[in-house]
Amino acid sequence: MAKRYYAGGRTLSTQMLKDAFSGVVKEGQGLQTQYLPAIQEKARTLDAGKVLSLVRGA
């Protein structure tokens, strides 16, 4: 977004913001599609004690 802002003469239009947001949403959807099976598999094998120790930093 910063590159567009400076390349466009330091102006932001609502269309530029909509386009940028749309691009981020599409990227996020692609990442979700890519990583969802691995996340679901990991979630099935989670041990609550291990998660707590990871959160605590132990």
Image: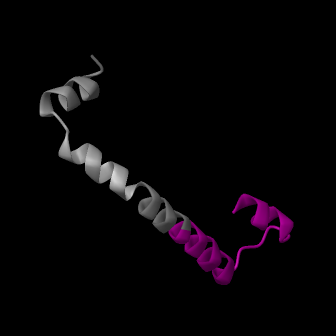
For the point 63% across and 71% down, which residue is it?
Answer: 20
> In front here: 58 or 38?
38
Q: Left of 19 or right of it: where is 3?
A: right
The outermost residue toward the top is 58
Q: Main secondary structure of the magenta part?
A: helix
Q: Left of 37 or right of it: where is 4?
A: right
For the point 55% across and 65% down, which residue is it?
Answer: 27
Q: Quadrant of residue 24?
A: bottom right
Position of residue 33 relative to residue 45, above or below, is: below
Segment tinted magenta in the rendering:
1-26
Q: Looking at the rendering, in which quadrant would you find the N terminus?
A: bottom right
For the point 56% across and 71% down, which residue is it?
Answer: 21
Residue 22 magenta: yes
For the point 42% across and 61% down, which residue is it?
Answer: 32
Tell me residue 48's x, y (percent): 14, 34
Q: Quadrant of residue 6?
A: bottom right
Q: Looking at the rendering, in which quadrant would you find the C terminus?
A: top left
